[in-house]
Image (spheres, rainbow, N blue to C red):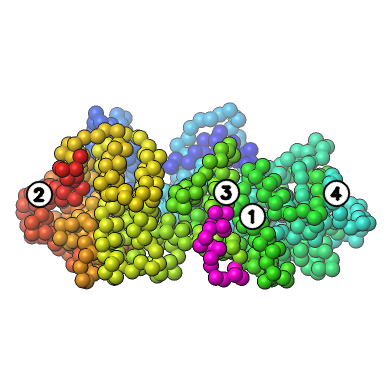
């Protein structure tokens, strides 16, 4: 990172004051004040009074309006806030000159400016938001104008002066948010945002002050960016012009040109310069087992910086080894393409400065003829499976700064320009004084060499190494396969298999739909659980890192599948065994994703083929095992599904002989669910159960006579503290009452789980199992209300922020009492997302689910009161009703999960 930028952001006190709460909530609170006529008429004399409590909370109230909230926060209870929450709010109000500085930190009066603004609104009722926007806009623009002057003074300060300046600190936050939102006003300053994000580990989604940034004047934001850029000495507006320029003058002769080798390519190892390599060996290709380009801007800048330092010291730069095999790059693809990007940037800078460009650059970037051995022809067009090279080919034809490689080039040119170096001298440093050892091998297996090199260097991910192994297996099989004689046909077969692996295996382990980030934890879980499922022994002791270890384990799984009876007995003899093994692995992966309820990653064809997945109540039972969150449950859940062959494509839920298997499976799955609830709510003390539950899962798979009683007892024995069923049930009830009856807000996901399971239990004749031994399918088993992918939400029946017109209809309404009771579990219900949005903060039956399956709303004659219509009604009756429902819901949860007294 530019040293001046670091000094600016760290030493010069332009700190980013990041708030946890979005400014929008502050804006909403101020808007709520000015909508209140009482507030407007009393604003001159009103004070915000803070009272600090012993539990590090703060009570905040208006002295003349005790029933009005100072700050609208969902976390607020009885006007009480956390210290940090109220301090941040007061800090913002003071910065915006809405509050005056106080002397004792406990009382705050409104500023003269805000008083005048409020008085003008007394007779206004329309467009209050617009008026507030104008008021805040004027304040923000005034403060940002002061900020510009502060930035101007920075360069005049003593280097050791680290005086704190709140105007700079806070204004910079607004500028940053505003500029992120308004990047279109001047794209060339985006470098500042990138650097700032890097320093503070921010994302463009970090928009705490988005509202204030929008209200700021565009010209002021430009001026701030300009002042900072001037301080840093960045003339950034020409960067895009440099890269867009197409007028390039090539030299007719070049002092660096070396003759071609007389004897062509052969096996050798020699020290060579960048120029020599590109002249001698430009017709290289990138084999498909190579990974994508992964260098980021920091790595590239480090390479450039290293070469600049060597240039200044009069030294050569050494870039390690480049290994080729005839026309393929085995090792060094990343460094060579990085050098290519740097050379392209240098060519563009030379051309923009109207300097002659070496002839070599024409050969590299302008010629597209195979006869000319151009880089564009060989290097780019033979790498059509790698996106970054496709993008670079587009840029060679026409500049596009929106492409990923285009953005990278902008950063490279900018970095070079900020160094203020002699570009001709730097060009010569790279071409003639940057060296590496070039080793060319003949009659070798390039994929084997590639794997060995990267295994030793530990640079590839598990899936990268496995992809290379698959490539090797394909080549080995094809060599012996008389059905595919043509080399072109063989290469096409390999490409298809690699593509199948990428789409159906590798891509399933990309984190958050990222193209680069591998979800290593998910991959490790899959491989470990698949070892258990396939009963494959793994006794190898190795001190290699996890990437290499899990690549070895997955390769070992492939080897077992290739030699398995299933793969070898398949009729299609034209398919390679590795391809058959891949398809088998793909099936197992879909099973695994189903078991952990990662439904969005499962292939639609698989879901269509496996009949049990259309039984929504069964999917819900799988989801209830918590395998998606508690990974210790995965081996158990998968083992039980296999025990009853539930996930076989031949298993049909509507066949009478399978009814009992569905019921029995649901009973076993419930034992997992119940155990996880007890472990989580009562017994968890940080202990790990992974090895114990793995051992139990192995018994389920190994012993046919392993019963559900064995299973239940071994689960309970895995917990150190063992008690009688009666004691266990009492402990569970006490834990549930303590956690969920009064204020379960922090456990909404758990509440959702309980409400869904209670709902099913009551609909299913007070039975948590799938009682499938009947002539027809119960409607609740196939109703999508029980589909885990349905976006059901837990919602307050009586809302947290009720509408005033609704509250006016309540008899005996008490604000403190209301706020307490709405957080009890008896006030919660289930709503689909669309209904929740539509009902907003309405009270009463309007908010109830219209789905007849939602018995949580309608109640049960014996066990559960229905949700009470709030309007018109007496709040005392409603609160008693909520209390009773809360007790009933806890009782039902205990009834569902209790251990039978006769089971020890």
Instruction: Judge whether 877 appears above or below 647 on screen.
Output: above
Q: Which circle marks residue 884 in the picture?
A: 2
- Upstream in the sequence, badge 3 or badge 2? 3
- Upstream in the sequence, badge 4 or badge 3? 4
Give the image quarter of residue 676. top left
Q: Which circle marks residue 468 in the picture?
A: 1
| Callout 3 crowding tier (Cα within 10 Å): few <14, some 14–19, many ≥20 | many
Viewer-closest of 282 and 600: 600
Q: Quadrant of the C terminus?
A: top left
Element at badge 1?
helix
- Upstream in the sequence, badge 2 or badge 1? 1
Residue 872 location (% of width, % of height): 8, 60
| Callout 2 crowding tier (Cα within 10 Å): few <14, some 14–19, many ≥20 | some
Query: Is 637 contained in the magenta span?
Result: no
From the viewer's perspective, tell me whether residue 144 is left or right of residue 49.
Answer: right
Element at badge 2?
helix
Q: Which stretch appears magenta?
A: 559-575
- Upstream in the sequence, badge 1 or badge 3? 1
Give the tally of numbered discs.
4
Query: Disc 3 marks which residue?
Result: 551
Tell me the distance, in whole angstroms, between the alpha carbons under discs 2 and 4: 86 Å
């Amino acid at each position: 990172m530019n040293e001046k930028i670091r000094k600016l952001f760290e030493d010069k006190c332009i700190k980013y004051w990041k708030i946890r709460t979005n400014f929008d909530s502050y804006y909403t609170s101020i808007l709520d004040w000015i909508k209140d006529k009482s507030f407007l008429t009393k604003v001159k004399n009103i004070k915000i009074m803070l009272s600090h409590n012993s539990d590090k909370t703060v009570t905040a109230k208006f002295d003349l309006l005790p029933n009005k909230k100072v700050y609208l926060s969902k976390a607020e209870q009885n006007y009480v806030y956390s210290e940090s929450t109220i301090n941040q709010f007061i800090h913002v109000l003071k910065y915006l000159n809405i509050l005056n500085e106080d002397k004792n930190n406990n009382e705050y009066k409104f500023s003269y400016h805000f008083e005048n603004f409020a008085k003008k609104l007394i007779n206004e009722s329309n467009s209050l938001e617009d008026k507030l926007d104008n008021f805040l806009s004027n304040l923000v623009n005034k403060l940002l104008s002061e900020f510009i002057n502060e930035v101007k003074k920075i360069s005049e300060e003593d280097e050791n002066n680290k005086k704190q300046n709140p105007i700079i600190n806070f204004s910079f936050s607004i500028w940053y948010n505003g500029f992120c939102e308004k990047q279109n006003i001047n794209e060339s300053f985006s470098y500042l945002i990138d650097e700032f994000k890097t320093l503070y580990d921010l994302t463009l989604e970090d928009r705490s002050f988005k509202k204030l940034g929008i209200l700021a004047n565009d010209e002021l934001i430009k001026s701030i960016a300009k002042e900072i850029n001037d301080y840093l000495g960045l003339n950034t507006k020409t960067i895009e012009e440099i890269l867009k320029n197409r007028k390039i003058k090539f030299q007719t002769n070049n002092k660096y040109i070396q003759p071609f080798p007389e004897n062509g390519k052969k096996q050798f190892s020699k020290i060579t310069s960048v120029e020599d390599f590109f002249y001698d060996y430009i017709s290289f290709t990138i084999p498909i087992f190579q990974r994508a380009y992964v260098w980021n801007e920091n790595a590239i800048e480090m390479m450039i910086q290293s070469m600049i330092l060597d240039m200044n010291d009069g030294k050569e730069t050494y870039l390690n080894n480049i290994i080729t095999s005839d026309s393929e790059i085995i090792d060094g693809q990343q460094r060579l393409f990085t050098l290519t990007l740097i050379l392209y940037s240098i060519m563009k800078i030379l051309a923009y400065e109207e300097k002659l460009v070496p002839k070599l650059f024409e050969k590299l970037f302008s010629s597209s003829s195979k006869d000319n051995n151009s880089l564009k022809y060989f290097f780019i067009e033979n790498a059509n499976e790698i996106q970054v090279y496709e993008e670079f080919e587009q840029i060679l034809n026409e500049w596009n700064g929106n492409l990923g490689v285009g953005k990278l080039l902008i950063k490279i040119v900018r970095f070079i320009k900020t160094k203020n170096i002699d570009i001709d001298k730097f060009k010569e440093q790279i071409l003639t004084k940057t060296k590496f050892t070039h080793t060319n091998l003949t009659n070798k297996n390039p994929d084997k060499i590639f794997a060995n090199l990267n295994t030793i260097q530990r640079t590839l991910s598990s899936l990268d190494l496995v992809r290379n192994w698959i490539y090797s297996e394909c080549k080995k099989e094809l060599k012996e396969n008389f059905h595919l004689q043509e080399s072109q046909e063989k290469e096409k077969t390999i490409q298809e298999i690699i593509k199948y692996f990428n789409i159906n295996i590798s891509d399933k382990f990309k984190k958050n739909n990222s193209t680069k980030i591998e979800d290593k934890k998910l991959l490790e879980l899959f491989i470990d659980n698949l070892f258990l499922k396939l009963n494959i022994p793994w006794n190898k002791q190795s001190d290699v890192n996890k990437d290499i270890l899990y690549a070895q384990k997955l390769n070992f799984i492939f080897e077992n599948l290739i030699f398995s009876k299933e793969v070898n007995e398949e009729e299609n003899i034209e398919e390679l065994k590795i391809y058959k093994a891949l398809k088998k692995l793909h099936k197992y992966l879909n099973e695994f994703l189903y078991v952990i309820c990662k439904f969005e990653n499962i292939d639609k064809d698989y879901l269509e083929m496996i009949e049990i997945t259309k039984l929504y109540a069964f999917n819900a039972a799988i989801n209830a095992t918590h395998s998606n969150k508690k990974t210790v449950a995965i081996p158990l859940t998968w083992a039980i599904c296999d025990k009853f062959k539930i996930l076989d494509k031949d298993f049909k839920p509507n066949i009478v002989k399978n009814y009992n298997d569905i019921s029995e499976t649901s009973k076993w799955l419930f034992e997992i669910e119940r155990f996880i609830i007890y472990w989580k709510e009562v017994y968890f003390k940080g202990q790990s159960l992974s090895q114990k539950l793995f051992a139990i899962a192995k018994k389920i798979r190994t012993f046919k006579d392993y019963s559900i009683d064995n299973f239940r007892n071994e689960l309970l024995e895995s917990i150190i503290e063992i008690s009688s069923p009666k004691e266990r049930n009492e402990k569970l009830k006490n834990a549930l009452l303590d956690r969920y009856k009064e204020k379960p807000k922090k456990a909404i996901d758990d509440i959702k789980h309980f409400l869904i399971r209670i709902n099913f239990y009551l609909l299913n004749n007070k039975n948590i199992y799938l009682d499938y031994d009947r002539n027809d399918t119960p409607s609740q088993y196939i109703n999508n209300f029980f589909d885990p992918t349905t976006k059901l939400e837990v919602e307050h029946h009586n809302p947290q922020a009720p509408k005033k017109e609704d509250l006016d209809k309540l008899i005996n309404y008490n604000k403190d009492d209301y706020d307490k009771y709405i957080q009890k579990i008896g006030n919660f219900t289930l709503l689909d997302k669309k209904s929740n949005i539509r009902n907003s903060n309405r009270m009463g039956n309007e908010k109830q689910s219209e789905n007849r399956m939602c018995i949580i709303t309608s109640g049960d004659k014996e066990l559960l009161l229905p949700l009470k219509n709030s309007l018109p009604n007496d709040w005392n009756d409603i609160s008693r009703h909520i209390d009773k429902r809360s007790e009933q819901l806890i009782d039902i949860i205990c009834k569902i999960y209790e251990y039978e007294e006769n089971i020890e």
